[in-house]
Image (cartoon, helix red, strand yellow):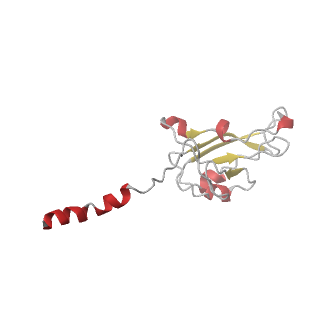
Amino acid sequence: MPKLLDALSGFRVTFSTMFKKPITEEYPEKPGPVAKRYHGRHQLNRYPDGLEKCIGCELCAWACPADAIYVEGDNNTPDERFSPGERYGRVYQINYLRCIGCGLCIEACPTRALTMTNEYEMADDNRADLIWGKDKLLAPAPETHR
C-alpha cells in the first residue's frame, strides 16, 4: 500500500495540470505585440527628397564589435547623385549571422542613416540569404519621388 501512495503522490503534478486550460500562442498567424523601442532589423534611411542618408563613411562598420557590417563608399557624380554630399555607400551589407543586435552601429552613424526597426522575423533556411544588402536594407523611396 505505501508504494501505491508514493506512485499517486508522484502523479500529483500530472493530474493537477491535466485539467487546466492550455495556454496556446498562435504565433505565425497572430504575432504578438512588440514594444515600441524594440530593436529589430536595421534600415538605411532616406531624406524626404528620396536621396540616401548614408555617406559611406564606414563608421558603423568600424564600431561593430562582431564585424557584421561591410561598407564600400564611392563618390557621387554630377550625373548620378545617390546622397546629397560628396560620397555615398555604394555597397552596404549586414551579415545577420554575425550581428548581435547591440546597436553600436546606430550610435556611430553621423547622419542617422542607419536605424533599427521593430521587425524581428528574419529567420531563413539558407545562410546566404541572411547577408542583407542595400536592396533589403534601404527604406522605400517616398511616393512623390519614385
Residue extending furthest toward the front: 1
Snapshot quadrant of residue 109: bottom right
Question: Between 143 and 11, which is closer to the camera in this rendering?
Answer: 11
- The quadrant of the rendering that contains the C terminus is top right
Question: Between 25 and 102, which is closer to the camera in this rendering?
Answer: 25
Residue at image coords 81%, 41%: 51
Horizontal arrangement in the rendering, residue 78 relative to residue 97 (left or right): right
Q: Where's residue 2, x and y in %?
A: 14, 68
Q: Where's residue 141, x and y in %?
A: 78, 38
Residue at image coords 54%, 42%: 28
Horizontal arrangement in the rendering, residue 94 relative to residue 5 (left or right): right
Q: Is residue 141 above or below residue 111?
A: above
Question: Between 130 and 9, which is closer to the camera in this rendering?
Answer: 9
Snapshot quadrant of residue 13: bottom left
Residue extending furthest toward the bottom: 2
Residue at image coords 84%, 31%: 79
Q: How many marks?
A: 0
Q: Where's residue 4, x and y in %?
A: 16, 62
Q: Where's residue 113, x and y in %?
A: 73, 50
Horizontal arrangement in the rendering, residue 33 relative to residue 26 (left or right): right
Residue at image coords 83%, 37%: 143
Snapshot quadrant of residue 17: bottom left
Horizontal arrangement in the rendering, residue 143 relative to residue 32 (left or right): right
Q: Is residue 37 above or below residue 131?
A: below
- The quadrant of the rendering that contains the N terminus is bottom left
